[in-house]
Image: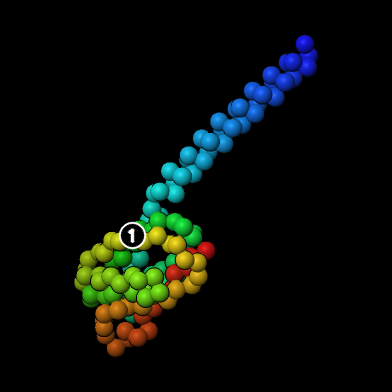
């Protein structure tokens, strides 16, 4: 009788652990579908923040606002090239599916310091 109760208790605990694990996994998959929003400011002659860090595999939504003239946001290795309108915001998404450090550059000539306008994206 005691042995049977122990077996029943172990069985119930095992079932509860399985249900908990499945619910936790479902919660994680829901979270991973939500984009990570990152706000970036572009102005002569810098991006703020100059370094963007994201997790590998995450969906990233960038909101890039120009505070002065038209700028570009270019990460050639990832095929990203967006124009940011003067005084406006460009919004776009991408999947961070490659690990590494990638150079961000302004792809629209914005003045004499244009060549110094860069940052980096780090996919961890």
Residue 118 vs 8, above or below: the answer is below
Q: Around disc 1, counting alpha carbons within 10 Å, would you say few (fewer than 14), some (14 to 19), or many (20 or more)?
A: some
Q: Residue at x 22, y 66 (%)?
A: 88
Which residue is farthest right?
A: 2
Looking at the rendered structure, the secondary structure element under dot 1 is strand
Residue 86 vs 17, above or below: the answer is below
Residue 44 found in image quarter: bottom left
Task: Give how far across and how far down residue 85 sits, in percent.
Answer: 21, 70
Residue 7 found in image quarter: top right
Which residue is farthest bottom?
A: 112
Task: Give how far across and how far down residue 66 sits, in percent.
Answer: 27, 70
96 relative position to 87: left or right:
right
Q: Residue at x 49, y 59 (%)?
A: 55
Task: Give how far across and how far down residue 123 sits, in percent.
Answer: 48, 65
Residue 77 found in image quarter: bottom left
Q: Residue at x 69, y 19 (%)?
A: 8
Q: Which residue is mark 1?
A: 93
Residue 32 vs 39, above or below: the answer is above
Task: Give how far across and how far down residue 69 sits, in percent.
Answer: 23, 76
Q: How is the image coloured?
A: rainbow
Q: Residue at x 56, y 33 (%)?
A: 20
């Amino acid at each position: 009788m005691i042995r049977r109760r122990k077996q029943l208790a172990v069985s119930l605990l095992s079932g509860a652990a399985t249900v908990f694990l499945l619910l936790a996994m479902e919660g994680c998959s829901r979270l991973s579908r939500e984009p990570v929003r990152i706000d970036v400011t572009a102005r002569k002659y810098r991006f703020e923040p100059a370094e963007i860090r994201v997790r590998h595999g995450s969906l990233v939504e960038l909101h890039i606002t120009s505070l002065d003239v038209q700028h570009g946001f270019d990460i050639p290795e990832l095929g990203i090239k967006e124009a940011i309108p003067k005084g406006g915001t460009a919004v776009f998404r991408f999947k961070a599916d490659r690990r590494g450090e990638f150079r961000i550059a302004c792809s629209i000539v914005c003045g004499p310091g244009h060549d110094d306008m860069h940052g980096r994206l780090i996919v961890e």
